[in-house]
Amino acid sequence: MFGEITCYGQCLRSWAPIVALIVIMSIASITASLMLKNPKKRLLMFGFAQAGGLFAIATTFYLMDCTEMLSLYLYFAYVAISTFLIFGTLRYYDRLMIRRLEAKPAGSILKWTQEYVDMLISARVYYFDSAVPKAFAAGRSIFISIGLLEILDDDELKAVLAHEAWHIRNNSRIPFLSRLAMMAFSSTSEPELEDKADNFAAEIAGSAALSSARNKIDKVFI
């Protein structure tokens, strides 16, 4: 590694300040991305930082006369792997969740759940082993916990499924980068989106069922 550092100084020469400036800008962009509150802007800033770092390394690699620069090859491998993970995660996120939670088709224990969701949107319903009453949407799949199934009756569960179905329908209309930004950089859902999902669930399953489901779930976390 020390030999590589020496080689950088010998080979870059007059280009060293320019490369150093690009690296500094990349680091500053990463720092800025952590400070921004808007998920989409954070993602764009992070992408700019990645592109800047890659350009600096590519420039260095082009100018170098030295051979077997291990650190450069390692960085190229990092860029390739991280890019695949970032953009591949959104496409296969629900599959990852199925494996992580060891989820199984909900239709195997409650046949009507899949039939009900099929009337609302094209999505699969899965259940997973957890005592915590929880439901969420990922990709084209809806996940519900055993704990949720135990405390809700059929009408209340329909309201929850309708709520999550709305999220899937809404997400399919959001541009790719926005969906990726929300998934990667948002820890909680936007209140406005939750309200719209609730309104849809109330229209489909009834406001009484939705309110009852929320009350039961809220009591668990009090």
Image (cartoon, rainbow, N blue to C red):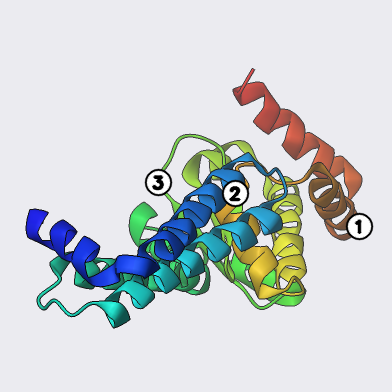
Circle 3 crowding by C-alpha within 10 Å: few under 14, some 14–19, many from 20: few
Residue 123 placement (x, y as % from top left):
61, 73
Q: CA distance from mark 3 to mark 1?
A: 30 Å
The residue at the point 29 percent across, 69 percent down is 12
Q: Considering only order in the chain, which callout, 1 or 3, is on the residue closer to the N terminus? A: 3
Which of pointers 2 and 3 indicates the residue nearer the eye? 2
Residue 203 placement (x, y as % from top left):
91, 57
Q: CA distance from mark 1 to mark 2?
A: 39 Å
Instruction: Work out whether residue 16 or residue 198 is closer to the camera in this orientation and state it.
Output: 16
Q: Is residue 203 above or below residue 75?
A: above
User: Residue beneath label 3, please?
Assistant: 129
The secondary element bearing badge 3 is classed as loop
Kind of residue at disc 1: Glu
User: Residue beneath label 2, please?
Assistant: 33
The residue at the point 89 percent across, 52 percent down is 199
Residue 136 placement (x, y as % from top left):
60, 52
User: Residue beneath label 1, please?
Assistant: 203
